[in-house]
Amino acid sequence: MSHVVFLRPDLNYSGATQRTIGTALALLEAGSRVTFITRGGSRSAAAAAHGIEIRPFELAPGRLGRPFLRRRLADLLVELKATSVHVSAADLAALGPVVARVTRRLGLPYVLEATRPIDREVEFDSALLRAVIVPAETLAEPLINHGRLPRELIVVLPGAPPDESSDARPHAPLGHTGPAVIGCTGSFDEGFDGEWFLEAARIAKQAKEPWRFVMLGEGPKERALRRRAREAGLTSSVTIGVPTTDTALSTLRSLDIHVSCRTDTGPGWLALQTMRLGIPGLFAAAGEAFTLIKDQHNGILIQPGDARRLADEIASLIANPERARALGEAGRRTSFERSPRTAFNAKICELHGL
């Protein structure tokens, strides 16, 4: 039986984590055993509920633990009887040397996956590295130019959230009583423009709009975003937090409008999941958004930082629910046509020899 072991430093609520879980599900469905080596996080229980084994392990130890990382990781991979390794990390350059040397020592084939831009060289083993997966074309060139990774190993594999979890909505967007719910999702880091979203919420409050705003995520900028919300007097209209394991997908389904705030890569896995749910989307005009979105047809492109335009477009959709639903349906079709789950599953299994 094959056993694919994922090296994922954390399991926080982010598009990258959801992509890792979605990738693991493809392998589980093909009959492989799957284990995550990770420090854990808010999505650990969700991963375990799918049948993924979780082995607590620190892949980015402090100074005292660094000299022992390779040996401890090698011992764990031997104990697990891994047949291949899948590495998903924001900083592949930091983890690359460890993975290359451990897999070389054990003779294990492996796959790298980059969900953020790379700005320095990534060490790799040319005999064992099977592929470098990127979710969008825009991430390929930095891997080649800065990461020094071979072009022929780059595999562009757009996100494809599982179809069975995305084919139904309890209600149509804006088809309920009460205030409209506008949400954004993802990792609160330097590539996530949460301030843009909060400024649009402030403009809406000034206009006395009754809308509710929800920021679903966590990360290094969370404290600053919470402070900004307090300073702007938005605590009654803006909720910031992580959905619970049981309600994560239903929380997404409760949104009437989704705003993609990623400015480094463009829309990620979570934005694609909202598209699959038929939720109309507003997208920061950056990265893969230019390829994915036909403006005013299957989504709306907005210059990052233009909070007035963002607030105006939200108001326009809320005032015209039929247009909002048509936009969401067009986005839904685009998502399924561009990245069918069957093709995603087949490629992941091929890369891991299943």
Image (cartoon, rainbow, N blue to C red):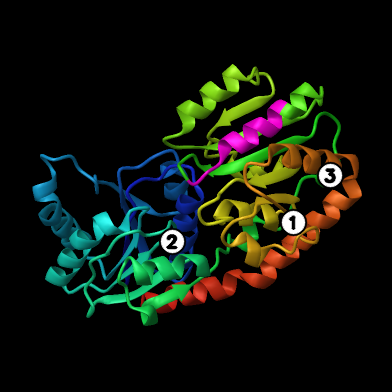
Work out how far the residue at label 2 is from the one at label 3, CA to CA, in angstroms: 36 Å
Image marks 2 and 3: residues in contact by CB distance under 8 Å: no
Q: Which residue is mark 1?
A: 299
- Specify the quadrant of the image occupied by residue 329: bottom right
Amino acid type at mark 2: Ala
Q: Residues within 10 Å of mark 3 (few under 14, many from 20)?
A: some
Instruction: Name the secondary structure under disc 3.
Output: helix
Q: Which residue is mark 2?
A: 24
Which stretch is magenta? 191-202
Q: Main secondary structure of the magenta part?
A: helix
Q: Is residue 269 left or right of residue 279?
A: left
- Specify the quadrant of the image occupied by residue 102: bottom left
In the picture, which quadrant includes the N terminus? bottom left
Work out how far the residue at label 1 is from the one at label 3, CA to CA, in angstroms: 11 Å
Q: Is residue 319 left or right of residue 21?
A: right
Q: Which residue is mark 3?
A: 317
Tag shown at residue 56: none
In the picture, which quadrant includes the C terminus? bottom left
